[in-house]
């Protein structure tokens, strides 16, 4: 057994990331491309989450890191009183247009998930589908969700898992463009251990494994859509030279081949996520 006390301090040190710089970088990534092109394909996740959380008409709902509003619209369709937030105003505009097209009443407000501009215990329900998991300061984001949720209220999330397709997508990109030293992986929100650490001290945590299936015309079609419109992938390609872009493209196609269950040339790729319900004490 190693003598931990005798180990050099440098070995045990953990790099401290510049969270403000990381947030600026991430905000720029999500503002690039147009996440709404991909986001609309995920609508079923918002609907399923609202059913899992047993959303009731008239409840006050906050959608955190809402993107173009999948959970927002699902909650509004159930006659909840919904506030939709994101730190990318352009995505809120896409959500506003979708709500108007469906004749739904929603309040849209630009907000940082790590500093929500609402009072303590303001909402009955907090929702986030593949959103809050991408915050740089994970502990602060969890504290904010808990703070604005009333006692006895619920927090519902959908978070990609590390071993699922999207978790592996980010791992593959990280092999070409390593994340800043000390930055926590968003996929930690897709693990029971991390979710319990973040939320169990403040309430009960229920976790159900789920699968969303990406359906595209072909693997090349998926790559074209994500490279053009999905901010993190768009930015990754833009940051690489031509040879690096070609290598990343080949690795992403190889990743799809590992997961693709279609045999007719199309893409049918299941991606694991966790459906999380936290009931605040």
Image (cartoon, helix red, strand yellow):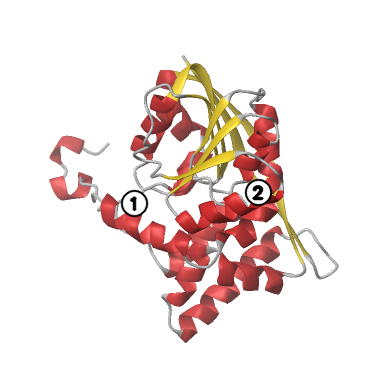
Q: Locate residue 59, reporting x and y percent.
A: 59, 23
- Mark 2 vs mark 1: in front: 2
10 Å crowding of disc 2: few (<14), some (14-19), many (20+): few
Q: Locate residue 147, reporting x and y percent.
A: 38, 25
Horizontally, residue 24 falls left or right of residue 257, namely left
In terms of depth relative to the viewer, which is nearer, 65 or 1? 65
Residue lying at 49% horizontally and 40% vertically, measured from the top left: 64
Task: Give the answer, above or below, for where 219 lies relative to 154.
Answer: below
Question: Between disc 2 and disc 1, whose residue precedes?
Answer: 2
The kind of secondary structure element at disc 1 is loop
Residue 8 visible in this rendered orientation of the protein: no
In terms of depth relative to the viewer, which is nearer, 140 or 165? 140
10 Å crowding of disc 1: few (<14), some (14-19), many (20+): some
Residue 29 visible in this rendered orientation of the protein: yes
Horizontally, residue 23 falls left or right of residue 242, namely left
Q: Which residue is mark 2?
A: 100
Q: Which residue is mark 1?
A: 183
Gap between marks 2 and 1, in whole Å? 38 Å
The kind of secondary structure element at disc 2 is helix
Quadrant of the image occupied by residue 219: bottom right
Residue lying at 33% horizontally and 58% vertically, measured from the top left: 24
In terms of depth relative to the viewer, which is nearer, 103 or 278? 103
Q: Locate residue 57, reporting x and y percent.
A: 67, 24
Residue lying at 70% horizontally and 72% vertically, measured from the top left: 221
Which residue appears farthest toward the bottom when viewing the image?
Answer: 242
**Cβ atoms at labels 2 and 1 below 8 Å apart:** no
Q: Quadrant where the N terminus lies?
A: top left
Q: Locate residue 138, reporting x and y percent.
A: 38, 40
């Amino acid at each position: 057994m190693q003598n931990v006390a005798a180990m050099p301090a440098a070995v045990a040190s953990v790099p401290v990331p510049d969270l403000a710089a990381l947030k600026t970088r991430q905000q720029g990534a999500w503002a690039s491309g147009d996440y709404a092109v991909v986001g609309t394909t995920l609508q079923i996740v918002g609907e399923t989450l609202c059913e899992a959380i047993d959303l009731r008409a008239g409840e006050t709902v906050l959608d955190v890191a809402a993107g173009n509003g999948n959970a927002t619209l699902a909650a509004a369709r159930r006659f909840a009183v919904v506030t939709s937030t994101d730190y990318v105003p352009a995505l809120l505009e896409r959500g506003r247009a979708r709500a108007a097209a469906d004749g739904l009443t929603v309040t849209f407000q630009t907000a940082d998930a790590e500093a929500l501009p609402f009072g303590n215990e303001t909402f009955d329900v907090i929702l986030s589908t593949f959103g809050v998991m991408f915050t740089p300061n994970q502990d602060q984001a969890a504290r904010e969700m808990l703070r604005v949720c009333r006692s006895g209220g619920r927090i519902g999330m959908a978070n990609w898992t590390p071993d699922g397709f999207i978790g592996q997508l980010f791992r593959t990109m990280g092999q070409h463009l390593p994340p800043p030293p000390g930055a926590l992986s968003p996929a930690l929100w897709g693990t029971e251990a991390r979710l319990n650490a973040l939320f169990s001290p403040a309430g009960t945590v229920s976790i159900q494994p789920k699968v969303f299936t990406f359906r595209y015309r072909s693997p090349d079609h998926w790559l074209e859509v994500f490279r053009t419109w999905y901010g993190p992938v768009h930015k990754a390609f833009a940051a690489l030279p031509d040879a690096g872009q070609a290598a990343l493209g080949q690795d992403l196609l190889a990743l799809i081949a590992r997961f693709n269950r279609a045999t007719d040339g199309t893409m049918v790729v299941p991606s694991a996520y966790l459906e999380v319900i936290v009931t605040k004490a």
